Image (spheres, helix red, strand yellow):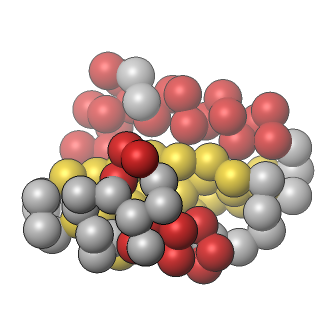
Amino acid sequence: MSLIYLLFSPKINRFYIGSSRENTVESRLKRHNEGRVKSTKFGSPWKVVCVEHFETYTQARKRELYFKSAAGRRFLKDKLPE
């Protein structure tokens, strides 16, 4: 089982979208908050906004790439509270 997750950093007021082959988001969140992920090390602490689970990693990556597209960002902007 794989997943995608949406993190938010109040420190820099930004979102981060990621995917993982792991079954839970806790270990990924820990790595992000410890500064072990290059793209998120300056935004710590991160908070989990939402998580979606998928049967395969390929499905998770497709959804992640959609959310990173212009259409996906618009969708998230409309759905997420400010």
* Residue 66 at least partly seen: yes
Q: Position of residue 81 (x, y in %)?
A: 19, 63
**Quarter assignment of residue 80:** bottom left
Q: Give above or below for 39 relative to 45.
A: above
* Residue 48 at least partly seen: no
Horizontal side of 42 relative to 5 (left or right) equals: left
Q: Which quadrant is home to the C terminus?
A: bottom left
**Quarter assignment of residue 41:** bottom left
Q: Which quadrant is home to the N terminus?
A: bottom right
Q: Foreground residue, 69 or 46? A: 46
Horizontal side of 61 relative to 76 (left or right) equals: right
* Residue visible at 66% across and 29% down in the picture: 62
Q: Give above or below for 34 relative to 72.
A: below
* Residue visible at 69% across and 53% down in the picture: 20
**Quarter assignment of residue 25:** bottom right
Q: Give above or below for 44 relative to 14.
A: below
Q: Residue furthest top?
A: 70
Horizontal side of 61 relative to 33 (left or right) equals: right
Q: Position of residue 31 (x, y in %)?
A: 53, 68
* Residue visible at 52% across and 76% down in the picture: 30
Q: Position of residue 17 (x, y in %)?
A: 44, 47
* Residue visible at 71% across and 73% down in the picture: 24
Q: Foreground residue, 32 or 76? A: 32
